[in-house]
Image (cartoon, grey):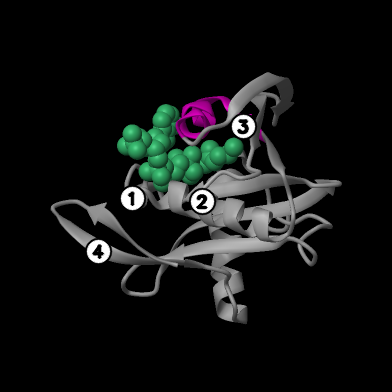
Amino acid sequence: MIGRFACSSDSKRMEVRAPNTDIEFEAYYELRWRVLRMPWGEDRGTEYDEHEEKATHVAAFDDSKNLVGVGRLQLVERNVGQVRYMAVEPGFRKQGVGQSILFQLEKKAREQGMKAIVLDAREHAVGFYIKNGYKVTGSSYLLFGEIPHSKMEKQIEGSA
Ligand SMILES: CC(C)(COP(=O)(O)OP(=O)(O)OC[C@H]1O[C@@H](n2cnc3c(N)ncnc32)[C@H](O)[C@@H]1OP(=O)(O)O)[C@@H](O)C(=O)NCCC(=O)NCCS
């Protein structure tokens, strides 16, 4: 998928697709760690889990082919997917990168026969998911003793 996103005063091209080389996967996990783990003192390696091999990975690349955003989809129960590890490079936020990744993950979910997506959203990201059609269904866990999460859900069957 080729999209466009605003970058300061101009508009640049963005590609949203699966990472497909060792170098791209290294950048993929490095960004995941740097945004979602490093600020809380977590070591490299804590950004992986046991579902990576079977999961669907999506990354956004800027017009210089730099990886600027990531997200993952995994099957958690029959017809239900879970989105995890959404992370956008700080200098590229609020330009549509996260939304493009989420849109691509939802497209992949539909292609895999999923009818709903669930996720646990960090408190500050709840508004992003609400913008994208997700509803809060309850409260969830406290990560690293300080980041509250909300359970969220979206029905994707038949949606665009
Ligand atoms: C959450 C995150 C992935 C969003 O990515 P992004 O590229 O900045 O989001 P987008 O630019 O695609 O935003 C899409 C829409 O959601 C809105 N939005 C984005 N972040 C928001 C937030 N935190 N709260 C409310 N609205 C938000 C945007 O303004 C935009 O709305 P618009 O279409 O009306 O302009 C990104 O901020 C991030 O990486 N945060 C740190 C890591 C993190 O918390 N990940 C989520 C873990 S659950």
* Residue highlighted by disc 1: 91
What residue would you read off at disc 4? 12
Residue extending furthest toward the front: 158
| Local secondary structure at mark 2 | helix
For marks 1 and 2, give the CA distance. 21 Å
**Distance Cα–Cα, label 1 vs label 3:** 21 Å
Quarter of the image where ligand 1 sits:
top left
> 47 or 59: nearer the eye?
59
Whichever of labels 2 and 3 marks the residue nearer the N terminus, that label is 2
Local secondary structure at mark 3? strand
Q: Is residue 143 above or below residue 89?
A: above
Marks 4 and 3, the one that precedes in the sequence? 4
Q: Are marks 4 and 3 in contact (CB under 8 Å)?
A: no
Look at label 3 and name its amino acid: Ala
Magenta segment, prevailing SS (helix, strand or loop): helix
Mark 2: few, some, or many residues within 10 Å (few <14, many ≥20)?
some
Q: CA distance from mark 2 to mark 4?
A: 19 Å
Residue 33 shows up from this direction: no
Instruction: Work out which quarter of the rendered image holds the N terminus and state it.
Output: bottom left
Residue corresponding to mark 2: 103
